[in-house]
Amino acid sequence: MVLTPLPWQHERWQQLIDLQDRGKLPHALLLSGPRGIGKQPLAEALIARTLCRAPNATACGECHSCRMLLSGYHPDLQSVSLTEKSRQIRIDAIRRVNGFVSQTAQQGGHRVIRIEPAEAMNVAASNALLKSLEEPGSRTLFVLIADVPSRLLPTIRSRCQQWSLGIPAAEAAETWLAERLGGVEDARFWLRVAGGLPLLAEELASGEARQLRQDLRELFDSLVRGGEPIGEAARLDAQSLDRVLWYGIAWLEDLIRLGLSGDPARVRNSDLLPLYRQAVKNARVRDWFRLLDYAREQRRLLAAGGNPNPQLVMEAWLVRWSALLRS
């Protein structure tokens, strides 16, 4: 198996490997862009090529180094990510990175450090990483991956070369997604729901995520018809608060677009238009903006490592929804 970038990343990939082949690739890269845009495949392809002993346009996939990487372990790769019970990357993990950087590469090539999501590093962890970023030693590559790079300390960002990935052309994304979902129409619908982010669209179309969306649609319908918000919140107690808020934000943005323009073609979730039209009748656009601000702030607090009570946040948010729909 050869790790390759996604089809729409060809130009970016050529730029990266050209820098690498000329010895001009910086020691620290920051790959950024919204979740679901495809940062991970690009990072994985670059890491594989960096560690490969016989790279071509991509890693060869056959040498001992490639086989180790594909097996799930490579002694010259240090990966840092969130643990199951934590929303922050803490200093202990970065201390292990610093120890790793001080060692010689076991395979005689590069040492690679991957940190994702990089913005999850708390202040102590970020400060601990600075020394290694400033003095990485030879043949060391840091790959930091961030959904929201502005949440990284400026001192971290300034020591990395930033590569921001944009939303791919719809045609390329639809072709790729249609192969995975089994049809162009499905691909087009879910890509629009996901705001043009193809990997997120694939995730949203999966069974569990699709069921959550259906549950939320029924909840939205119930609130529009006068349902009791506290009781509705209880239906979501086992769901991811972050994902529920994501859907809510996307739907509020649709409501605002429809309320301001009156143009149904501008909404992303076209199947919700009947509910949107009813909701738009019951509340003013500025009220939807306030509710949107609340949802965004709750997601920001979650991303910053906060640990709110999901049930209380859900209840407070749905009470606000309900109050607007009945106004």
Image (cartoon, helix red, strand yellow):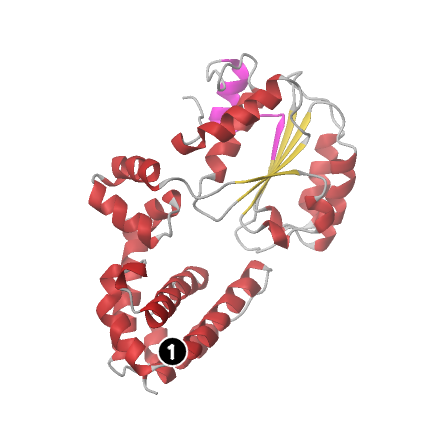
In the image shown, does 39 or 2 lie closer to the viewer? 39
Question: Which quadrant of the figure contains the N terminus?
Answer: top left
Q: Quadrant of residue 223?
A: bottom left
> Residues in magenta?
63-78
Q: Residue at x 68, y 30 (%)?
A: 27
Q: Is residue 75 magenta?
A: yes
Q: Is residue 205 visible?
A: no
Tell me the quadrant of the picture where the C terminus can be found: bottom left
Q: Residue at x 44, y 64 (%)?
A: 241
**Amino acid residing under circle 1:** Trp
Q: Position of residue 189 (x, y in %)?
A: 26, 50
> In this rendering, is residue 157 above or below 250?
above
**Residue at label 1?**
321
Residue at position x 35%, y 81% from top? Answer: 283
Q: Position of residue 11 (x, y in %)?
A: 48, 28
Image spot of residue 277 (x, y percent): 26, 73
